Amino acid sequence: MITTSLIKTALTLAGKIISPLIFLLTILASYAGYINPLLWATPSVLVLVFPYVSILTIIVTAIWALRRKIMMTAMGVITIVICLPAIGQIFPLHFPKKAEAGEKTFTLMTWNVLHTDDQETPDCGYNRAVDYILKSGADIVCLQELYTLDGRDLRYYTPAMGDSIKAVYPYSASTTKVSDVKVLSKYPVKILTDSRTDHEGRTRRFFLFEVNIDGRPLTLCVTHLMSYSLTTEDREILQHIRGVKSAKESTQKFKASVYAKLKAAFRLRAENAIALREATEGIGGPLIVCGDFNDVAGSWAYRTIRGDDFKDAFTATAFWPTFTYNAHLFYFHIDHILYRGPIEALNWKRGDIRSSDHYPQTATFAFREN
């Protein structure tokens, strides 16, 4: 007869075998983003799971600590310490700040609106995305996956909707027609780059704008980096896991289809990130890079763009992890707002509207003299 003591012994042994593997995976995932996908793309896949394995490491370490298993607890703590810089990027513990007296502030929203098609309530009878934007109070709105600001790309478009957009945002900047990046603004805005390709002939996945905020020039770099190009069938592979058999089938399909597309996307985004970083190197003054990165904090693309000089509005002012993509069980934080120069992020918040497969995010900034 199997006794309770025997079961506990077996579980403890299993835990001692599995826990080090979890700790090792967490360490590898936390530093995999330093490897250029152009040289080796496989480690980039690990970066995607880092938020989840790091949380699992914290939970497992806490369990061992409660059981007073010193060796396993120490291994977990060491893992957390080693991964602390990466954990801080996805698990911030900060609070919103207040503007100082006399400081000029502005609010910026970035959102991949999915052409305002409304994945949640497609037949609601009005454009929820536009309604949300108009009521947001944001001074500057940076949009991705939107080719036009009229009836060709705005769901349930009416002349009254167009008038409302112009009334709230009298200034807008639309890039070349084949680009899906748009900017709405309460302040004068102009396009600094409107070419689909750069000087080396590479496809441009970002565009530069300048917004004049009461005489203070702000440079915007709005980006929509290369996506994974997954089909609906690809995205449903992981959702079909219901047991060992289905997990095995999904793993085989993942290797055959999804994995190859992921690696290709990592490499293309690496090229996008290099081009974006080069374009922003010589820009002085306040600069914000925002949009749909299609990659998480800690990834090679994110690290390349951020460098050592940009700050992340989420990391600097938010409390607790979050995700900005909300469909197909791929709950990742892939939309970002980075900034540098004489501005400071005061707060960051994520909207909860699900009309798009991305959530909107908004940050408030203050101009700083130093």
Image: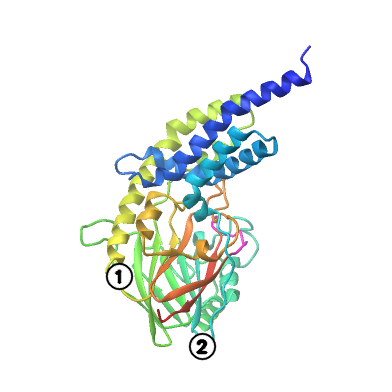
Picture layout, residue 283 above or below residue 358 = below
Picture layout, residue 129 above or below residue 200 = below
- Circles 1 and 2, Cβ within 8 Å, touching? The answer is no
Magenta stretch contains residue 285: no
Tell me where residue 19 appears, x and y as whole percent.
57, 32
Q: Nearer the viewer, residue 169 or 248?
A: 248
The answer to whether residue 310 is visible is yes
The three-letter code of the residue at mark 1 reads Thr
The answer to which image quadrant residue 138 occupies is: bottom right
Disc ID at residue 201:
none
Tell me where residue 130 appears, x and y as whole percent.
56, 70
The answer to which image quadrant residue 284 occupies is: bottom left
The answer to whether residue 146 is visible is no
Look at 36% across and 42% down and name the residue there.
264
Indicate the quadrant containing the N terminus: top left, top right, bottom left or bottom right. top right
Look at 37% across and 46% down and name the residue there.
266
Q: To which residue does mark 2 refer? A: 102
Q: Which one is closest to the eye, mark 1 or mark 2?
A: 2
Q: Which residues are magenta?
A: 350-358
The answer to which image quadrant residue 348 occupies is: bottom right
Tell me where residue 335 appears, x and y as whole percent.
48, 58
Picture layout, residue 52 above or below residue 288 = above
Assign a secondary structure to mark 1: loop
Q: Nearer the viewer, residue 47 or 122?
A: 47
Assign a secondary structure to mark 2: loop
Tell me where residue 2 appears, x and y as whole percent.
76, 14
Q: To which residue does mark 1 refer? A: 193
Say left or right for 291 vs 239.
Answer: left
Between discs 1 and 2, the one toward the N terminus: 2
Look at 48% across and 31% down and name the residue there.
253
Number of marks in the image?
2
